[in-house]
Image (spheres, rainbow, N blue to C red):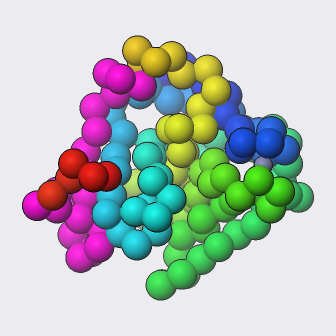
Amino acid sequence: MKKTYHGSCHCGTVRFECELDLSAGTSKCNCSFCTKTRFWKAFVVADEFQISRGTDALSDYRFGSNTIHHFFCGRCGVTPFGSGEMEELGGKFYAVNVACLDDATAEELAWAPVTHEDGRHDRWDRAPTETRYL
Ligand SMILES: [Zn+2]
């Protein structure tokens, strides 16, 4: 069941809230960005996501095809979420950094199913051969 979660960067300048069901699944990927940021994500449709404060502090990093906005706080450097637009994901979406959810309990995080994606080879529909380090 979806519930409202509140999230933030490390310094608290950037805050957001979203509707999310962690038991519906999360994902980790081995692409060059996710590997270096340890990005653990859950997808949220745009109308169930809201930046509560700190929009001005967000920096927008893009690479490759430039289609995904990898936002990070310009003060503390933490990446609370990214965004993009993909038909497969229902149009505009946010990829929330699960590790930045302040009110997710340890139990909710522990029980959240994790799907692994082989983003390094643009094979998002399958897991890489090694996932234990992700
Ligand atoms: Zn910050």
User: Which residue does the image show at 66% across and 34% down from the upper left?
Assistant: 7
On the image, the x and y values in percent for residue 58 come to 78, 60
User: Which residue does the image show at 21% across and 48% down from the upper left?
Assistant: 132
Q: Is residue 86 shown left or right of residue 114?
A: right
Looking at this view, name the residue that lies furthest to the front. 133
Judge whether residue 27 can be spotted in this image.
yes
Q: Is residue 2 shown left or right of residue 35?
A: right
User: Which residue does the image show at 54% across and 81% down from the upper left?
Assistant: 63
Q: Is residue 68 above or below residue 101?
A: below
Q: Quadrant of residue 129?
A: bottom left
Q: Is residue 69 above or below residue 106?
A: below
Q: Is residue 68 shown left or right of residue 51?
A: left
Q: Quadrant of residue 82?
A: bottom right
Please say whether residue 102 is one of the residues in the magenta stretch: no
- How many numbered circles are shown? 0
Q: Nearer the viewer, residue 75 or 56?
A: 75
Judge whether residue 50 can be spotted in this image.
no
Looking at this view, name the residue that lies furthest to the bottom. 64
On the image, the x and y values in percent for residue 55 come to 83, 54
Q: Is residue 2 above or below residue 120?
A: above
Looking at this view, name the residue that lies furthest to the right. 56
Looking at this view, name the residue that lies furthest to the left. 129
On the image, the x and y values in percent for residue 18 come to 62, 33
Please say whether residue 118 is one of the residues in the magenta stretch: yes
User: Which residue does the image show at 59% across and 32% down from the upper left?
Assistant: 101
On the image, the x and y values in percent for residue 36 come to 46, 64
Q: Quadrant of residue 51?
A: top right
Residues in magenta, as a range: 109-129
Q: Nearer the viewer, residue 122 or 76?
A: 76
